[in-house]
Structures are given as structure tokens and as C-alpha cells.
Amino acid sequence: MIQGNMPYVKDSHFPVRIFFIILGSLLLVGAFHMQIIVLYDKHEGSLNGILEVTFVILYWILVSLFITEYITVQIKKTYEEPMKRIAEATGKVAKGDFSVYLPPIHSADKMDYLDVMITDFNKMVEELGSIETLKVDFFTNVSHEIKTPLAVIQNYTELLKKPDLSEEKRQEYLDAVAKAVRRLSNLITNMLKLNKLESQKIKPAPESYDLCRQLGECAISFEQIWDQKNIEFEADFEDEALIYADHELMDLVWSNLLSNAFKFTEPGGTVSVTQISDRDFVTVAVSDTGCGMSKATMEHIFDKFYQGDSSHATEGNGLGLALVLRILQIAGASITVDSKEGVGTIFTVKIPVTTEAERNERNE
């Protein structure tokens, strides 16, 4: 039997009762045969020998037909019908129908190999359906994200052609075009980075470095933003915290998290970064007093192109957090989010502390 996710899986597909049915049937027909012989002995001389042999042959032909039919029915019910259902379902999936579902043949306590095959088939179809949905969503979102800045560029380019345009308006339109170009450039850059990470075309180059210094340098790069929005920035780091990771990729993590924090925090709010260490993990928390997120939004926040702001009023393309998640997965780290609408959001990153032996193993 197989033990695992399944409570119990039988080794043999045929139940033991079939053996006893066939044994009982053979004993029964054998008893009838013996009775025929006894009757023949009693009436010896009154029955024609050829007739008697013919009768015995016909009798065993009938017995063979009965056993053959019984076994055929069992094979058909046990193998042929389920395999036919699986073949029909596979044909539907091959044509793009991912709504196919095959009910198991037996209950959970009587499962066999075909039930396992059917269960795995249903899981496979469900996954294929999810992939197909993601593919459709991907192209829809990519089209939207590319179309929006292109439309802005096209509209303002037409306006810039006006001969009587004031210098003030001209500069305003040029700024709008530049902003749309940056948005389009960021989208393409993030798409390429995410694709390379997922296809493992980017090979991480982990090294030991001071995370606290990296966090400080990254935070300083947003100084102009927090000054413009009058946001209070708070930082609480240790003097030093060494981690073993790809410095450049981790820069993308902190930049994305801080960018989101400042973007969604209203003027006068607060953004903070705290870092603590223990024997097992180095933990970084990026928090803000922004608009926060609903539970539904938090469930999809790391999905590609997902944006909690369905109006796309805030600048972004929904790839930043997907990129963050993939980088942290590669680094063996984790990220969680805790948010409350109207209160704020906290992203917590936990990076495992690696020993020298573990580092050498990862480099091999």
C-alpha cells in the first residue's frame, strides 16, 4: 500500500472477494460435474456414449463462458470504464477545456492506484486552469499597463505640436511625457528582471555584507521624497548586521518596499524602518501610516500586476512586490504583510543567518 497524502491506497486493484467468488463457482461446477458422472454410472448402457461426451463438453463450454463473462465484466468495470473516462477527459483538456473533473471511483478508505491517478489528474487540470487564467490576466494587464503611458505620450505629443503653446504649458506637457516614459521604462525593466529571475537567467552572487549600511543608503535615496511630502522618517538599526545574500538584488527589495511606503503615505504621515537580529534571523520591518489594505488585497499583493488601487490612480505597475517575493525566495528569506485600512501597513522580511558551512554548501 502507499502512505502519504492519501489515507490508504490498495496495492491490488482487484478485491479479495473475486478470488472467493471464482473459487466458489469452480467448486460448484465441479460438484455438478461429479453429479453428472454419478448419474452416468447409474444409467450406464442406457445413455449413448457420444451423447454423454457431448453433454459434458457443452456443460464445460457453458461454465467457461460464464467465467469469461464474469471476468470480462469485472475488467470492464474495474479498468476499461475508468480508463475510458480518463481518456475522454484528457481529450477535453487537450482542446482547452479546464473545467473537467473526474470523481474518484472509491471512497477514501478504499482508494487504489486508479483513484490516485484520477486525483492527480484533477489537480493537474486545476493547475492548468490557473495557469491559463494567469496567462490571460498577464496579457490583459500588460496591455493595460503599456497602453496607458503610450496614450499619455501620444496625447501630449499632439498638444506639443500647437504653435501658440505657452512655455509654461509646453514644460508641463514635457514633464507629463517624461513621467509616462519613466513609467513605461520601469514596467519593461521590472518585467525583464522578473522573467530572468524566474527562468534563472540571473545567477545570484551572494556575499557577506552589512545590511544596516545598505538600509541606510537606500533610505537616504528617498530623502527628497519625504521632504517634499513632509513625511517623518524613522530608522532604528543595529550598529552592524551581516547577512549573506546578493547585494544588488537585495537593493531592489528595500527600494521597492520603501518606494511603496512613501507612495501610499499621505503628507504628514510616518514611514519607519526597523532592524533586529537574533541567533537565527535578521529581521527588517518597513512600516507606514498610509491608506492600508483590505484582507482581499493582502491575499493578492504579491501577484504579478495586481494593484490594490483598481483605478490605477497611483503610479506603479504591480510588479514590484512580485519581484521582491522572488528575490527573497531565491535568498531563502521570507516576507509577510500586516495591514489595516486607514491605519497603515507593515512588511516584515526575515533573512536566515547562515553559517560558514551553509555558505560553502550554497556556493557549490
Image (cartoon, rainbow, N blue to C red):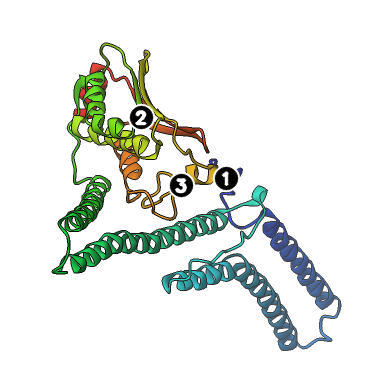
Q: CA distance from mark 1 to mark 2?
A: 54 Å
Give, as a three-letter code, the residue at label 2: Ile
Which residue is under mark 3?
A: 300
Query: Where does residue 272 sit, x and y in percent of width and height?
Result: 37, 24
Query: Where does residue 45 sit, x and y in percent of width and height?
Result: 82, 84
Q: CA distance from mark 2 to mark 3?
A: 27 Å
Inspect this view and state whether residue 65 appears.
Answer: yes
Query: Which residue appears farthest toward the right when viewing the image?
Result: 42
Crowd tier of the residue under label 1, counting other residues whose Cα lies within 10 Å: few below 14, some 14–19, many 20 or above: some
Between 26 and 123, the one nearer to me in the picture: 123
Q: Nearer the viewer, mark 1 or mark 2?
A: 2
As helix, strand or loop, the secondary structure at mark 2 comes to: loop
In the shown orientation, is residue 312 left or right of residue 198? right
Crowd tier of the residue under label 2, counting other residues whose Cα lies within 10 Å: few below 14, some 14–19, many 20 or above: many
Which residue is under mark 1?
A: 6
Query: Which residue appears farthest toward the top when viewing the image?
Result: 239
Give, as a three-letter code, the residue at label 3: His
Inspect this view and state whether residue 328 appears.
Answer: no
Compare marks 2 and 3 and give the one earlier in the sequence: 2
The answer to whether 132 is drawn above or below residue 279 in the figure is: below
Compare marks 3 and 1 and give the one earlier in the sequence: 1
Residues at circles 3 and 1 in contact by the CB criterion of under 8 Å: no
Identified at 32% across, 41% down, the residue is 326
Give the position of the N terminus as an image quadrant: top right
Identified at 18% across, 56% down, the residue is 174
Query: Where does residue 177 sit, x and y in percent of width and height?
Result: 20, 57
Which residue is under mark 2?
A: 231
In the shown orientation, is residue 193 left or right of residue 320? left
As helix, strand or loop, the secondary structure at mark 3 comes to: helix
